[in-house]
Image (cartoon, helix red, strand yellow):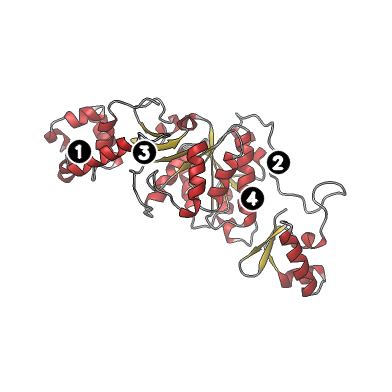
Amino acid sequence: MTQDPGLASWLQLTLTPGLGAATIRELLGRFGLPENVLGAKRADLARLASPEALTALDSGAVARAVEHALAWLEQPGCTIVTLADAAYPRLLLEIADPPALLYCRGRTELLSRPALAVVGSRNATAQGASNAEQFARSFSAAGLTIVSGLAQGIDAAAHRGGLAAGGSTVAVLGTGVDVAYPPANAALAAEIAERGLLVSEFALGTRAFGHNFPRRNRLISGLAQGCLVIEAALASGSLITARAAAEQGREVFAVPGSIHSPLSKGCHALIKSGAKLAESAEDVLSELGAFRRTGFASTRAPAAATRAGEGPAQEPLLECMGFDPVDVDSLCARAGLPAERVAAELLRLELAGRIAALPGGRYQRLN
């Protein structure tokens, strides 16, 4: 991709301490392109920018930061997209506070493709992570790019699902695009940089500061036509993303869960406040309306029982479990079996990948 010859001016503005996004937009609105801002009299700039920011604007520290960013661009797959570029995502122009530029690693063409945000808990259950990956795989197969935040749990599962099909995935970071965070997802980030897209509005080298992630969330929703939440507590960053999506006029969807699970409370609250309930990928695609429904498998939860020859073989203990987390004592009471027999069956089912052991001595059915 050919870079804007005035990119150094964009970098100088955005890398100057004290020039926030709102101030930069005001300066651009008043003076035009960044080179015009930098060429203006400092007395004129002082009407919009603080004295400290104007001093920093021409500092050696900012000049070195600009040089570092330009050198980073020499690496394969590295791009910076500014508000003036044709590649700047149109959907971000519709939000209240679009970033002046985006640092990108990977396939920048994904910024202009139809997309769906898929977000949820970092502490996802095995079933929640499985749902996220299956849903995302189905959306990706239908032509949607999956947008998420590269966090552990639901985000990571959604990215893996997106990579598994043609729509691919975009990871929006709360750090610099050159910072591997969280470290546990470093290999996934490298795969996304190769086959999808890593994107951030934060300067290179920016560490994982807590206040950056809520700000990052508006871009996750802003890049997409809709937002699907899978497992979220009531106090959750995923709900911040969902609120941002609603404020931006995007469709909001939520997957319901057990009434006993704290990770269902946020999704249920969204549904109560008007989010659309999603039990399958088809539910979301039919609402978005513009995507083909061929080639994806249903992600609807299996029925409590199946007829002979249809689906997984029946397991009496699984029928007693249902799909809510359950402890051994409750299973013994439901099945009318001794604890030793139930423990042996649980071990067999876990090894077969039919159930997952949860904290607190509970178990959850997976299929």
* Amino acid at dot 1: Leu
Mark whose residue sits in front, 3 or 2: 2
Q: Is residue 145 left or right of residue 80?
A: right
Q: Residue at x 13, y 35 (%)?
A: 42
Q: Residue at x 68, y 36 (%)?
A: 296
Q: Is residue 14 left or right of residue 283?
A: left
Which mark is drawn over residue 130?
4
Mark whose residue sits in front, 2 or 1: 2
Of pointers 3 and 2, the one earlier in the residue sequence = 3
Q: Are marks 4 and 1 in contact (CB under 8 Å)?
A: no
Which mark is drawn over residue 298?
2
Q: Are marks 1 and 3 in contact (CB under 8 Å)?
A: no
Q: Is residue 328 left or right of residue 131?
A: right
Of pointers 2 and 1, the one earlier in the residue sequence = 1
Between 276 and 323, the residue placed more toward the observer is 323
Of pointers 1 and 3, the one earlier in the residue sequence = 1
Q: Which residue is mark 1?
A: 48
Tag 3: Cα neighbours inside 10 Å, few (<14), some, or many (≥20)?
few
**SS category of the residue bearing label 1:** loop
* Amino acid at dot 4: Ser
Q: Residue at x 61, y 57 (%)?
A: 125
Whole-number angstrom distance, CA of label 2 to CA of label 1: 54 Å
Which mark is drawn over residue 97?
3
Whole-number angstrom distance, CA of label 1 to CA of label 3: 17 Å
Whole-number angstrom distance, CA of label 4 to CA of label 1: 50 Å
In the image, residue 291 sits, relative to residue 178, either above or below, namely above
